[in-house]
Amino acid sequence: MTKTDLVNFIAEETGLTKADSSRALEAMMGGVVKGLKEGNKVTLTGFCTFTAKDKPAKDGRNPRTGETVKIPARVAVTIKAGSKLKEALN
């Protein structure tokens, strides 16, 4: 499912226009990003929890050449499925 498909789904389910659905989806995604940037966990109860984790710099290896490369420090996002999502899929 693409973002466009999701906007269309929201519009059909809620009766909102596609433009309103798109703005709502953008606002939700913006809220998740803002929460993670502030160092918070973002929990959508029963659906999932987003967490930002700091990953330190490390040495890696280029598999083609075997050359050692530096991998810079970064922030990675983890997503843990909630109970309702797990139940819906199983």
Image (cartoon, rainbow, N blue to C red):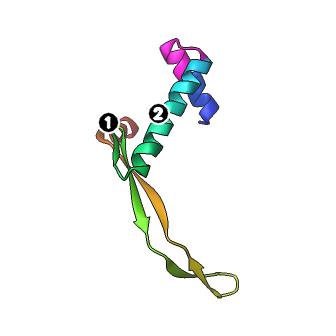
Q: Earlier in the sequence, mark 1 or mark 2?
A: 2
Name the amino acid, label 1: Lys
**Residue bearing mark 1:** 84
Q: Is residue 70 above or below residue 43?
A: below
Q: CA distance from mark 1 to mark 2?
A: 19 Å
Rendered location of residue 57, percent (x, y): 49, 76
Q: Quadrant of the N terminus?
A: top right
| Residue range corresponding to the magenta coloring | 9-17
Q: Does the stretch in magenta take in 5?
A: no
**Residue bearing mark 2:** 28
Residue at 52 percent of width and 30 percent of height: 25
How many numbered circles does the render carry? 2
Horizontal placement of 11 versus 53: left or right? right
Front of the two marks 1 and 2: 2
Residue at 44 percent of width and 38 percent of height: 31
**Quadrant of residue 22 within the rendered picture:** top right
Asked which secondary structure carries label 2, the reply is: helix
Horizontal placement of 55 versus 87: left or right? right
Rendered location of residue 34, percent (x, y): 44, 44
